[in-house]
Image: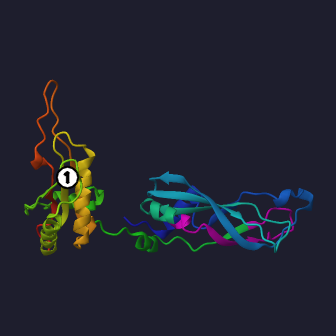
Amino acid sequence: MRLPSRLIARVVDVIGVGLGVAASLGGCSNRQALASCAPESWQGECQLTSVTKVEDAEFPIPHVVFEAVYRPIASPRYPGFTPGAIAQRTFAKAEHELPLYDYLEAHPRVACRTETPANSACVSPKVAISLAPFDPAAAARTSAAPPVTGCAQIEATSTQDKLRGGQQTQTFVSQRIQFAENSAELPPDADTVTGAVAELLSARPTIECLGIVGQIASGEPPALAEQRAKAVRGLLGAHGVALDRLLTIGVTAKVFGNGARPEAGDPADRKVGFSVLLESVGKP
């Protein structure tokens, strides 16, 4: 339900904040005595020192309020006088919390000036910040995250529904690369094998993530499995395969129970295989 602008204005009045609501935090600057303090005109720049969420409520509409504190920067144009710090609060709907925070942080230094009091009383002049009002629509356009593609979809929360609904693996990759004992050095036939895999990926854009599964035989260092997989990944990249479509996986030797003796290392286990982890069935 969209609330009338009159009610939203009332909300701002109730919580005591709104766009452009500010309050001076300092008294007479530079430790001037109250009797000698006189209003002065000043303009320059203010440095953002902090951004704090001071309000997070659901009634009458979900909303947040951020307080940004700015400190005027001393200027040689006004020797002996610098205004005190200024706190400015900004109201936004709860759905715009992160864009609002990013907007304030993206403007660490802004133009500012004092507003001379109407009377001659010895009071601190009010500091006004020259910052364009927060525009939720514009902030959403500039901060929109790029779509998640490739193997990153497997862990991305935003794509879990997509993965659950219709993602299937229908392609089998039969190629294998055998390695020498205790070695991650690519064998002579590795270039031919990875070339064939690269051709398959080029012909099948539906394969969004290919697992490169490095394995070791019993008795070999566990880290060798990942090293073998990374070596093959680099070679596939040299064949033009986008690296974000490749995910390395290290598989170590079998685990045996208490009292059991590990089997002798099988040379066939010293290999890198391939497994399609993510394939879009209906993707053109």
Magenta residue span = 103-126
Q: Position of residue 240 (x, y in %)?
A: 23, 73
Q: Nearer the viewer, residue 183 or 94?
A: 183
Element assignment for label 1:
strand
* 144 left or right of 205 in image: right
Q: Position of residue 224 (x, y in %)?
A: 25, 48
As drawn, 182 above or below 66 = above
Residue at 75% from the left image edge and 61% from the top image edge: 84
* 144 left or right of 88 in image: left
Q: Position of residue 162 (x, y in %)?
A: 20, 61
Residue 47 in view = yes
Q: Position of residue 256 (x, y in %)?
A: 15, 32
Residue 186: image quadrant is bottom left
Q: How many marks?
A: 1
Q: Which residue is mark 1?
A: 214
Residue type, label 1: Gly
* 45 left or right of 92 in image: right
Residue 39: image quadrant is bottom right
Q: Residue furthest right?
A: 35
Q: Nearer the viewer, residue 191 or 214?
A: 191
Q: Is residue 150 magenta?
A: no
Q: Quadrant of the N terminus?
A: bottom left
